[in-house]
Structures are given as C-alpha cells and as structure tokens.
C-alpha cells in the first residue's frame, strides 16, 4: 500500500483477535433447504422460458405405486418396509429393470405434449389448471399449475431414467431418441421418512408389496435478514415418486404469495394450491404408468 | 451412492471445513451476529444450489467467499441502508473456551468502528486486512479500479484510526 497508516500494522491482527475464536452457527439444514428451492426455481425458470437446460421443468410419469412390483424387477426382493436400512433402497436405480436398462421408445417420453398436459389436467382439482407450458419437443412437456389468479407456485417435474435423453435434448434428438442421456437426481430423494430431516411432516408412498416408492413432505422455509424473518412463501409440499428404469417425478406446491411480488411477499391468508393428499394423488396416479 | 446424496455429503463436508472462516468474514462485513448468520445462510444456500458447478472450479473456497461478498454487497444495495446496529454482544455464537473477555470487548469495539464505514469501504478493509488480498485482487473482486481501492482503504483507515484511537493508543487523524 502506498500511503502507510499506523493502523496497517494492527488492523489484521485486531480483526483476527476479534473474530478468530468465533464458530459458525449451524445453518446448514436451512441453507440446503433454501439451496434446493433455488435449484427448483431455476428449473422452472428454464423450462417456462423455453431454455434448453439439463434441469428443465417437465411433466409426465410412467409409474404407479400400486403396480410397481408387477412392472419392475427386484422390488419385492428388497422392500423397505420389510428390510429398512440406512441406505437409500428405493431409488429407481435399485428397482429398475436392471443395469444398463434403457428404452427410449416406451415411456412418458413417447407421449405427445398435448397428451401429457391433457392427462395432467384431468387429475387437477376443480379450479386448478395447467398454466405456462413449454412444448418444445415431442414427448416433453413443462409448465406450472395455477389456481384462479393466485400466484401460488406449483409445478411438476419429470426426471427421466438414467440414459434417457430428457427435456434438454434437441428436437432432432427427441424425434430420434437414444440411450445417451445422463442420470438425473430428484430434488428430494425417495428415502424412508425416518431418514428425512428438517421437515414438518413426511408420508411414505408404498407399493402393494410394501416397497417404498415415494414420499410426500411438508416443509417450511425460513429466511432471515438481520434477525427478522422475511415474509416469503414458506410452507410447501414436495412429493417425489420413483419410476421404472430410474426416473423420478416430483410435484412442488408452495404457499401463496402476492401476485405483485410473487417471490417475496407472503400472503398469510393463503395456502398451497394443492393439499398434501392432492399432491400425493397426482404423482401416484395410474395414468402415468401406462 | 446416488448423485444427490453424494452432493449433500460433499457439500456438508466442505461446509464443515469452511463455515467458521466464512462466518468470521461475514461477521466483519456485517458487524452483527444476526446479520452474519443471515449472510452465511444465504451464501451456503447459493453455494449448495450451484454445488456441482462450484466444486469443479479451480478454487471452490475462493469461489464461495466471492459468493459471500457478492451477497453482502447485493443485500446492502437492496436494503439501501448503509449502517447496522451494533448494540448486542454476540457471545451466544462464541465457543466459550476460545476467547478471552478482552477479545469479546475487542470485537464489540471493532465492530462498532467497522459499522461506521460504508459497506463498500468495509468490504475493502476486510479483503485487504482480513483476507490479506492485494490491491489488484481486491479491485478485481469488488469491480473497482486499483486507485479506487487505495483511496477507499486510505479513507477507511483514517476513519478507523479516529474511531479506535483511544483503544489502540494511536494518534488521531489530522485531516
């Protein structure tokens, strides 16, 4: 530094003495929860704006919990209900048709965007409709759900099985699908509720054979600035269900926010657009398995 | 181990190694424990959201500190508020055995002085004296010119010297 100040000799040391013994508070659970929501919003933003991104928002489901054991190999061999372990037993990888499985021609990705949207619309409660969509490619559909004019934040995400080209594929790739896609991890892993942390409530979705195939959680996000909690959309439901071959379907329904500042101002009188039961019913509906 | 779980484990491990340093930096920037905790949480949330990209960078630690700095400056801009209260002692975040009472008193005095600086001047001081960065690096991190960093440093030191004169037994500024 050009102009030497006597404080030069002291300030660094003084700072070290002042804060050197401080230990960080444990904010990791909250940070991870916020980070996951940021990832989710990015996915939505990409999908709705039509950006071809690896985390685009999509909808469709080739699975139903109740029929799981008839459609895949292995689940009855290792149902979580009968043999719970600390490891993630219910990922789609563990119950898919087997290593190397990939069928680019049979599954949700083989449906048209209109078909997927129509099938979803039939599952929605009265007053809730499919809103912004992204129909950029055959078999790919993405968008938000809307109830009235409310600014609730609701969306469904499809994560295709490993190896299947997902929503980020080009139109040509969609028309001529190959098994060259990557693995896609769900925002919320399918794992026994006893392994989940930082949630208000957790319900497991199990197949008739007792295998864990999905979970529905209720969570709350708290954002603090200068020790004051900020009025953001706080309560939300998140449901994840694993699908044959290793894919996942997720549905996220957040507590309402004011339309003029949808991402920042919480409306205390509002509720998530869908109840936990509705969220569960949509992701596990048999329509997605056919 | 599937990717998301591996990500969580790696991220948690990374945070366990870095969070104290990040928090101390946040404390110096914000000057209050609550604001430092908020800033740390914001930083870690952003880091987690971009973890797969962040961990592949040459220097994830530096990248995370950059996130913290940007979050601090961004928040200051959004709040349009340059000063923060410094009325509370932060003992509840301090590991009891690691700091003597004199260090706690030091911290209160220093934070009160730092709080008098503008956020950008404070950031300059923290980068230069806490992170021991060069003028050039500080300028790059704050998107300032090198002369601007020198000027802000000089101005901040003058202020701090006056504010801490009694404490440090330093001559007061004559300018």
Image (cartoon, rainbow, N blue to C red):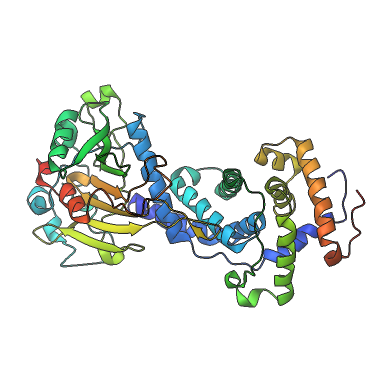
Residue A176 in sight:
no
Residue A256: image location, x then y, percent: 33, 48
Query: In the rendered view, would you say A18 is above or below A2?
Result: below
Task: Looking at this view, name the residue that lies furthest to the front.
Answer: A269
Residue A49 in sight:
yes
Identified at 71% across, 39% down, the residue is: B139
Residue A62: image location, x then y, percent: 15, 42
Question: Residue B110 or A110: which is nearer the viewer?
Answer: B110
Task: Looking at this view, name the residue that lies furthest to the top.
Answer: A172
B128 sits to left or right of A190: right
Question: Residue B76 or A36: which is nearer the viewer?
Answer: B76
Q: Quadrant of residue A290?
A: top left
Q: Quadrant of residue A43?
A: top left
Identified at 29% across, 58% down, the residue is: A218
A242 sits to left or right of B143: left
Residue A78: image location, x then y, percent: 16, 61
- Number of labels in the image equals 0
Question: Residue B141 or B70: which is nearer the viewer?
Answer: B70
Can you say which quadrant of the picture contains the N terminus of chain A?
Answer: top right
A258 sits to left or right of A283: right
Residue A91: image location, x then y, percent: 24, 53
């Amino acid at each position: 530094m050009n102009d030497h100040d006597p404080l030069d000799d002291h300030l660094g040391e003084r700072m070290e003495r002042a804060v050197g013994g401080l230990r960080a508070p444990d904010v990791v659970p909250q940070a991870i929860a916020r980070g996951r929501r940021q990832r989710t919003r990015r996915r939505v933003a990409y999908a709705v704006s039509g950006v071809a991104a690896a985390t685009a928002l999509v909808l469709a489901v080739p699975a139903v919990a109740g029929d799981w054991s008839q459609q895949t190999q292995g689940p009855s061999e290792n149902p979580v209900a009968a043999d719970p372990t600390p490891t993630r037993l219910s990922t789609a990888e563990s119950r898919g048709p087997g290593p190397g499985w990939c069928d680019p021609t049979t599954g949700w990705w083989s449906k048209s965007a209109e078909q997927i949207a129509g099938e979803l619309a039939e599952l929605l409660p009265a007053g809730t409709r499919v809103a912004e969509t992204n129909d950029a490619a055959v078999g790919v559909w993405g968008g938000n759900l809307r109830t009235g004019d409310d600014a609730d934040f609701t969306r469904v995400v499809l994560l295709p099985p490993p190896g299947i080209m997902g929503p980020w594929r080009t139109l040509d790739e969609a028309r001529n699908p190959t098994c060259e896609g990557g693995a896609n991890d769900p925002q919320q892993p399918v794992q026994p509720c006893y392994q989940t942390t930082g949630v208000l409530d957790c319900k497991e979705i199990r197949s008739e054979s007792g295998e864990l195939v999905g979970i529905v959680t209720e969570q709350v996000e708290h954002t603090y600035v200068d020790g004051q909690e900020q009025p953001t959309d706080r309560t939300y439901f998140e449901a994840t269900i694993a699908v044959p071959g290793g894919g996942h379907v997720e549905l996220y329904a957040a507590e309402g926010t004011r339309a003029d500042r949808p991402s920042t101002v919480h409306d205390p009188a509002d509720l998530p657009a869908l109840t936990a039961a509705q969220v569960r019913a949509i992701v596990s509906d048999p329509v997605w398995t056919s | 181990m599937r990717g998301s779980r591996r990500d969580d484990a790696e991220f948690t491990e990374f945070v366990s190694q870095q969070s104290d340093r990040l928090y101390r930096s946040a404390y110096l920037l914000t000057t209050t424990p609550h604001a430092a905790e908020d800033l740390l949480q914001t930083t870690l949330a952003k880091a987690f959201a971009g973890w797969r990209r962040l961990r592949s960078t040459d220097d994830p630690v530096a990248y995370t500190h950059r996130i913290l700095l940007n979050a601090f400056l961004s928040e200051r801009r959004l709040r349009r508020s340059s000063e923060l209260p410094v009325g509370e002692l932060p003992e509840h975040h301090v590991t009891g055995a690691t700091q003597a009472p004199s260090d706690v008193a030091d911290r209160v005095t220093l934070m009160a002085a730092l709080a008098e600086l503008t956020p950008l001047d404070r950031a300059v001081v923290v980068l230069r004296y806490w992170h021991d960065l060069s003028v050039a690096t500080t300028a790059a991190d704050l998107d300032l010119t090198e002369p601007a960093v020198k000027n802000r440093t000089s101005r901040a030191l003058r202020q701090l010297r006056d504010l801490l004169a009694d404490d440090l037994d330093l001559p007061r500024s004559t300018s």
